[in-house]
Image (cartoon, coloured by chain):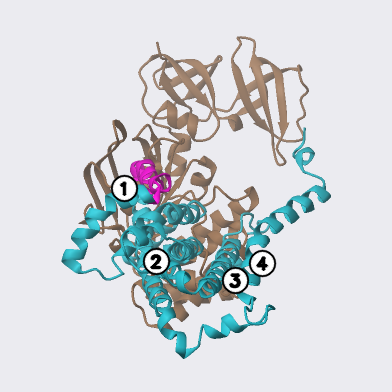
Amino acid sequence: MTDTAIATADNAILAGARTGSAVAFEGVVKDYGRTRVLHGLDLAIQPGEFVSLLGPSGCGKTTALRVLAGLERANGGTVRIGGADVSAVPTNRRDLGMVFQAYSLFPHLDVTANTAFGLRMRKIAKREAAERVRDALALVGLTGFGERFPHQLSGGQQQRVALARALVTEPRVLLLDEPLSALDAKVRVTLRDEIRRIQLRLGITTVFVTHDQEEALAVSDRIAVMNAGRIDQIGTPEELYLRPATAHVAEFVGLSSVLPCTVDGGVAEVLGIRLPIVGESADGSAEAFVRPENVRLGGPIDAVVLESTFLGSVRRTVLRTAGGQLLRMQHAVGERVEFDERVTLGIEPAPVAVRPREG
Amino acid sequence: MTARGFAPHPAVRWLIGLAIIVLFAIPIVSMAEYTLRDATTGGHSLVHWIELFDPAKAGTYRPIWTGLGNSVVLAVVTVAIVLLLAPTMVLVELRFPKLKRPFEFLALLPISIPAIVLVVGLAPIYLAIGRTIGTGIWPLAFAYGVTVLPFAYRAIQAAIDATELRVLAEAARSLGASWPAVLLRVLAPNLRPGLLAASLISVAVVLGEFTIASLLNRQNLQTALVVVGKQDPYASVILSLLALAFAFVLLVAIGRIGGGAPRARRSSRPPKDQP
């Protein structure tokens, strides 16, 4: 599809679109039997914002989304959409669009009828519905696919139709429950970027659940990192990457080497190199999270190469220092190192996250 | 050993198939031959088939037509009862998954209870039904609903297992569908093969059941055939043959539906992924 066609389709939808609504979780508690999966979740999402819930499986991110959708009933707390408490409102009256992880197109309906389903439920006149369906399919790049049935589409195409179907009703909030995880890597990246493009154009409030940190970093305005039913930190991708609030966030977002250090007056001494720290930390013994892109060849640290992986545009190498610490380094492809080779390393003076040493 | 190792030789397969065909064909062919016997000439003719529509013998055959009418009414009411099973099963699947096992046990129970035992329990109930809503034929469909339950349950459950019921229901709900709309517009079309199979099996059972109707003194096609058979054995054999043929057609239809209309079914392997 040409850019002009995309722009026309977007404008058509934009003309009828409302601004996204604010979403708020206030002390939301959810139990499954005796297991508490959400421990008083608090989260405020601005209208038009793209927020990702990121965390390992079982951290409660999908449950939070399902509570917002009304597919699960919370045991306590309040969920607000557009300022109104929707805790008692059934799913079908919450005015949401949702894309699921599993392929959820109705197998007995073709692409057009699938996309028109929400409009039909809202009793929109046939002519208007036909127009809006056409625009929505153009928006996701599936013009001309209207008469196909779901089993005649690839996984990526099915999720595009699901997206069009969710957007065509101009919902107040778009919920994405790991919509990309069933797709192969290349399609995942393309569709991810496309979701963000569409979201920005429509200005729709979006909550995106994912366990893939790269995905969350690439598309979100803000990311809420979840762990065991709680939000560890919420912030922009840059904040999370550069100033992780907890060890879990530092470990989960991006790659780091965890190295012992001593903090003294806002400066951490890591392997004999003095580095500024992010945030505040009490003086004393601590652990520093050093990003692999801040480690370079040549410097005061002696190390031996354990493995080196070619990743296309960069090379990533794991090394062991003379003191026995493991260190990850990301470097130019041209800088070849061999297994068991002895090298010297330095660390760029970029700020590092630290946590007090446990025990 | 590979699975192929267990497969019998094609010749053996044909032999087994042939033996089964012969086994089923002998009584059916004998019945057909019997209906064609002509006592006056000692040869074969269509005289008994033609007599079926002879106005002079209408009185003798009247119970058969009454019974056939009753059986059709029973079939319709039983199918209606069976179709009520589907929303119940969907509800159990989506909202009360813990009830699935007990429900299955209950639904399959009638298969293990002989009809004659069932009648012992049903007799006093139907006595009460007779007193309150009359001795018409249609209340018998309640008893048939029970006998049909295991077959209908399996057919519908197979369709439910083959469908992503929960995801489809949740997707429809998120798009603004009320529960009735979810059931009628999304789930029913996807459970269609199971619903049709359950209905046709119900019809087949209704057209084959004798014990309950006979012991509760209700007249359906089967009991009428026995009554008429005492006066005119040819007519009852002809109609038995026709009933068999009808049941056969029904089973073939079920098989076809089970094979499925391809567009309504989800492909297990979608085409190669493209953006």
**Percent coordinates x, y for residue B28 in the rendering:** 63, 65
Q: Residues within 10 Å of mark 2 (few under 14, many from 20)?
A: many
Q: Residue at x 60, y 32 (%)?
A: A293
Camera-near label (1 vs 2) is: 2
Q: Tags 3 and 1 in contact by the CB under 8 Å rule?
A: no
Q: Residue at x 46, y 90 (%)?
A: B55
Judge whether residue A225 is colored magenta.
Answer: no
Are discs 3 and 1 located on one and the same chain? yes
Are discs 3 and 2 located on one and the same chain? no
Q: Nearer the viewer, residue B54 or A249?
A: B54
Which mark is on residue B79? 2
Which mark is on residue A148? 3
Which mark is on residue B29? 4
For chain A, what colour was chosen? brown
Q: Tags 2 and 4 in contact by the CB under 8 Å rule?
A: no
Q: Nearer the viewer, residue A182 or B227?
A: B227
Which mark is on residue A72? 1
Q: Please give the range of residues in magenta.
A: B96-115
Residue A266 appears left or right of B7: left
Quadrant where the N terminus of chain B sits is top right
SS type, badge 1: loop
Query: How many angstroms separate mark 3 from mark 2 (CA)?
Result: 34 Å
- Report the residue that reaches farthest toward the left: B132
Camera-near label (4 vs 3) is: 4
Above or below B118: residue B78: below
Q: Residues within 10 Å of mark 1 (few under 14, many from 20)?
A: some
Q: Chain letter for cyan?
A: B
Give the amino acid type for the residue marked by disc 3 in the picture: Arg
Camera-near label (2 vs 4) is: 4
Q: Tags 4 and 1 in contact by the CB under 8 Å rule?
A: no
Are discs 4 and 3 located on one and the same chain? no
